Structures are given as C-alpha cells and as structure tokens.
Amino acid sequence: MKTLLELRQVSKHYGQETAALSDVSFNVKEGEFVSIIGPSGAGKSTLLRCINRIVDASGGEIFFNDENVLKLDKAQLKRVRRTIGMIFQHYNLVNRLSVIENVLHGRLGYKSTLAGMLGLYSEEEKQQAVKMLNILGLQEHTYRRADQLSGGQKQRVGIARALVQKPKMLLCDEPIASLDPNAAKTIMDYLKTISATMGITVLVNLHQVDVALRYSDRIIGVNKGKVVYDGSPKEMSSSMIHKIYGSEAGELIFDHGGQNAG
C-alpha cells in the first residue's frame, strides 16, 4: 500500500519556551485507520492541525500524497485541503442553516469566493450531499436546522460535510469527546465503515484508550509533544499506557470510555 502521509521531524513551538511538538516522525498508508492517543495537552490537536496547515509547523517536513505541504502557496494549499476532510470536537456547523446546507459547505474548497457566498451548488453536488446523509442515517433530517439536532447527529453532519469533499484522508480531532457512550460508538462505527468501504485514510485523536484499541489498525501514543509509541493495538501493554498517560493511566486502564461521557 502506498504511503499517503509522512511526517519527518515535525516540531511546533509557541514562543521561546513552549514546544507543543518535538521531532514527530511517522507515516500513514492509504486506507489505514490510525488513532493518536495521549493525555490532554500532549499535542494531539496541534499535530492534526499542522498536517493541513491550520497551524504552521515550526520545523520538519510534512508530505501528503507526495507533496510537501509546508512549501505550498495559498492556491496549492487550497487544492490539497480539498482532499483532507476535517472533523471537529464541537462540530463547527452553522446552526441557523439546514443540515444539507451545512453538508454542502464541504464543497466550498472547489468554489470561487462569490459562488460560495451565493451558495451556488450543482445538481450533482446536491445529490452527493443527499447520498452522504443517507449513508450516515440522516435522511429524515435533511432540511432540519442544524441546531435542532443532538450532538451525535451534528457530528454525523460534520462527517457528511467532510465526505462530500471526496477526501483521501479524514482528520478527526477528538470527534467523540463531547458525546455520550452510545453516540460515541455510533460515530466510531461510521468512521471505521467509511474507512473500510471507501478506502479513506482516517487519522483520529482520541482520549479513550479502549476505543483506540477496538477500532485502530495502528496506534500512535503522544506525550509532551513526542511520539512514545507507534505500533499495533495488540502490542499495547499497561506499562506502555502508563508511559503515554503518566499519572492519568490508572483510571484509563480500568475505565471503559465513560470518563468523557456527557
């Protein structure tokens, strides 16, 4: 399988003192489902945001689909971002718009500024949006306002919005942190199915070790901005969980994903 994403000694510094990431190196193959785990403040979100340059890395190289992302100009970056879908912890939906209008926002990277502002979408794009809503079990909510949905439904709209981009990769930043365990399981099941059936690479930040173990082809453990584990879920030991999470590890090993319920 082809390598889709490669990070070489990526670092990110905020000011003189704070190193959010230090010498992060790993690669991800096409179609792989990779979880990044670690305590709060470990650098997981910064790492994802460096990949699509929402945040600019301070050093190193990031190759996506054989292009060095850090060297792209504005137009080139827009083109590459079309193929990288982003799913956020707090959904980032426009509450006053309908579900389908929110999904169609995934096509904005293909539009001129004016066409985007006027909401000019082709019939094919609308059909694609409807198809994605059907895949994600949201067909009954197509024309509802986004603020009338539950958290789990909002996150599925976020996934549909990312999928209409026709991405090669999804970056999911704590996509289940705001959800109760049942909604969280639904979201993870959809992400896993999408990866398996559409061949889309998924890179997901998670706080819950048990969820990462259940769904991932591979786990990358991050602590204080450094990669301390990169391997199979099967090889993840309790001593490694301690290494990744430090003092938080005890409750994580015995707690099955409930610590972020709510």
Image (spheres, helix red, strand yellow):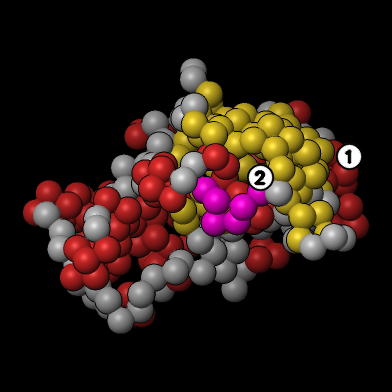
In-front residue for pair 33/21: 21
- Would residue 181 be counted in the magenta stretch? no
Nearer the observer, 7 or 69: 69
Q: Amino acid at mark 1?
A: Ser
Identify the residue at image location x=59%, y=73%: 262
Residue at 54% from the left image edge and 64% from the top image edge: 89
In magenta, the rendered stretch is 52-57
Q: Is residue 53 above or below residue 219?
A: below
Percent position of residue 150, x then y: 41, 73
Q: Is 133 left or right of 76, judged from the image as shown?
A: left
Whether 28 is drawn above or below 88: the answer is above
Q: Is residue 230 visible?
A: yes
Vertical position of residue 62 compared to residue 29: above or below: below
| Placement of 212 over or under 117, stated as above or below | above
* Residue that mark 2 sits on: 36
Furthest toward the top, the residue is 1
Helix, strand, or loop for circle 1? helix
Q: Which mark is residue 239?
A: 1
